[in-house]
Each structure stands twice: as C-alpha cells, then as structure tokens.
C-alpha cells in the first residue's frame, strides 16, 4: 500500500536559476533502477471542496473558484511505481506490491485510480488516494503497457502475449475483451492508447499501429484502421497522442527504428513528417511532442551509451 497521502499544495516559487540564467532542474530521488515510463496528469480542483483553502489553487486563478494540480507517476524496474506532486517533485507515495519490473504506470483522467503493468505477468489497479490495491488482473506473459479510457471505465493492456485486453473496471470480475494482433504470428504490443471511449491504438513490434474498435462484435470489422511506420523501422518503441490546444488537431507521435514520425489523426491518419534521428529506438527510448506543436523531444540508445535531443 501507499505510505503517504498527498497534502494540500502550497504555491511555490518558480524553479531556481543559476547565476548564468539556466534553470536548475528539480531532482526526484527514490528509484534505484532504470525508469520505464513517466506520465503527467493534470486535474481541476474546486476550492469549495477543499475547505475553501486557497493553497489548492496552484494556478492563482481566484475568479473561477478552481485551480489545477499536476501529478507525476513513474514506472520503474525496481518494482516500486511512485506518485509525486509534479510542481514541486515532492514524493506522495509508492504503489507497493509487484514482484517484477513495472513497465507502465498511469493515472486515470480524474487521478483517482492508478494502473500498473508489470513483468510479474499482472496488472494492478490502485486507489490513487489511499494507495490500496483494488484489483489484480493476471496475464500469461510480461505486460508492457496500459491506458485508461477517457471515461475511466475501462483499462486496456498489452505486452508480450500479443493480445490487447480491455477490462471493465465497473465489473472487475468480468472476463476482459481480447483482441489478437495477428493470426499469422505473435506480435508483441509495446504501447496502447485510447483515442476515444471505443477505440484503442495498439503499437506492435511489427511496425504497425492497429486501431481497434473494442465495441464491435464482428471480428472482421474490429480493426478500423492501420498505420505503418514502414521501411526498416522495426518495432514501435513509443507512441503518444496529443490534441493541440491551439488548433484542436490530434497528433500521433511514434518512435520506431531511427525515426520519429508524426500522423494527423484529425485528417484520417495522414503522415505529417518523419524525422531521422542520430539515435535508435531498438531497445529503449521515446518521443514527446510539445503542446505548442512546434518542437519535440526524443531520447534513445546508441553504441556505447544513450543520448537525448530537444
């Protein structure tokens, strides 16, 4: 169980800068092995539900009666996924219970539930407030990825089995829906993301992203669309969906092989551009698009070490 519950947030000063004007990063110690995944989750908070305490309004917005708070969750090979306050880096708690490396940790959109995917062949669902384990869903191989539906009712999982599973959190005892990536060969799933409450994108080690309509009962119609990174990219290592605040366009960012490729999901999945990087995403790494849509960051491996690009 989690060892601590989050205290109220007090407005803090901007991160300190060095004498040269460069920002000093916040260091968050605690993990003892490599990180596998990070997620920021921002929620709106009603101060009236928090005893009218203005310290909960981290944005300083006093006119709306609401503020926002951002959390950071980290999945790690040390089996101990952690929850932190993203504004300060302060540790809130640890979800303790897995017996293998944790490859994915995600909060649901309301930040009330957390899901963890592990090398111990299981997925666990946690109460993100108390840290108590609510449900454990067994799998038959290493689970590498999971994601919450936008309404927080369902949880999608995937991994080395090559099967996308969709669990109904409102009926946890119910058998999950299962979708095999390929009937010809086993295709491991590296990442999965919901794009709406009915459609899950599953990134495969064969370089193909499959759009699964999980509410469709006809197997011949369950794959609504596919996208491929093509060429010699190999397996997809990372995948991210972001809706740009400025334009409303939904952009899919994919890291595979030596390329970071962008697709416009608002335009039917049209490829925007593919950038060849001086790093490789064969075994590690990922990419993330800035909310402004003009720049991205990527990190991956190379011979003799690793590097990151801004």
Image (cartoon, rainbow, N blue to C red):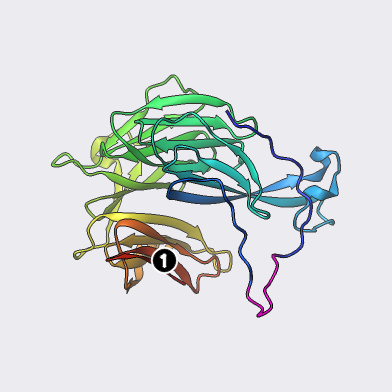
Instruction: Read off the residue under disc 1.
Output: 298
User: Is residue 197 at least partly visible in the picture?
Assistant: no
> Based on the displayed image, in which of its 4 quarters is residue 5 positioned?
top right
Residue drawn at x 78%, y 55% as measured from the top left: 11
Residue drawn at x 53%, y 26% as measured from the top left: 133
Image: magenta residue range: 15-22
Q: Determine the secondary structure under disc 1.
A: strand
Percent from the top left, x then y, of residue 159?
31, 40
Residue drawn at x 35%, y 67% as measured from the top left: 260
Percent from the top left, x then y, of residue 217?
31, 32
> Based on the displayed image, in which of its 4 quarters is residue 253 positioned?
bottom left
268 versus 199 height, above or below? below
Percent from the top left, x then y, of residue 229?
27, 62
- Does the stretch in magenta take in 124? no
Left or right of 275, for residue 266:
right
Residue drawn at x 73%, y 46% as measured from the top left: 45
In this view, the residue in front, 210 or 106, is 106
44 versus 93 height, above or below? below
User: Is residue 129 at least partly visible in the picture?
Assistant: yes
In this view, the residue in front, 82 or 246, is 82
Tell which residue pokes out farthest to the top in this image: 173
């Amino acid at each position: 169980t989690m060892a601590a519950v989050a205290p109220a947030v007090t407005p803090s000063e901007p991160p300190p800068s060095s004498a040269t004007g460069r920002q000093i990063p916040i260091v968050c110690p605690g993990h003892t092995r490599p990180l596998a995944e990070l997620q920021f989750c921002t929620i709106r908070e009603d101060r009236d539900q928090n005893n009218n305490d203005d310290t909960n309004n981290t944005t300083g917005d006093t006119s709306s009666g609401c503020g926002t708070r951002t959390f950071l969750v980290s999945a790690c090979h040390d089996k101990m996924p952690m929850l932190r306050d993203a504004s300060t880096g302060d540790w809130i708690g640890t979800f303790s219970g897995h017996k293998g490396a944790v490859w994915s940790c995600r909060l649901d959109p309301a930040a009330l539930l957390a899901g963890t995917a592990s090398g111990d062949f299981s997925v666990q669902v946690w109460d993100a407030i108390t840290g108590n384990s609510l449900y454990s869903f067994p799998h038959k191989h290493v689970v590498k990825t999971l994601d919450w539906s936008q309404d927080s009712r369902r949880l999608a999982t995937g991994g080395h089995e090559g099967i996308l599973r969709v669990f109904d959190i409102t009926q946890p005892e119910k058998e999950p829906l299962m979708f095999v990536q390929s009937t010809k060969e086993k295709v491991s799933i590296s990442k999965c993301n919901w794009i709406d409450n009915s459609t899950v994108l599953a990134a495969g080690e064969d370089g193909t992203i499959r759009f699964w309509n999980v509410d469709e009962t006809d197997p011949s119609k369950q794959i609504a669309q596919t996208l491929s990174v093509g060429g010699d990219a190999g397996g997809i290592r990372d995948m991210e969906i972001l809706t740009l605040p400025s334009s409303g366009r939904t952009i899919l960012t994919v890291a595979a092989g030596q390329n970071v490729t962008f697709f416009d999901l608002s335009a039917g999945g049209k490829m925007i551009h593919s950038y060849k990087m001086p790093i490789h995403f064969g075994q590690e790494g990922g990419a993330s698009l800035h909310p402004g849509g003009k720049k991205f960051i990527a990190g991956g491996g190379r011979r003799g070490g690793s590097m990151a690009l801004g």
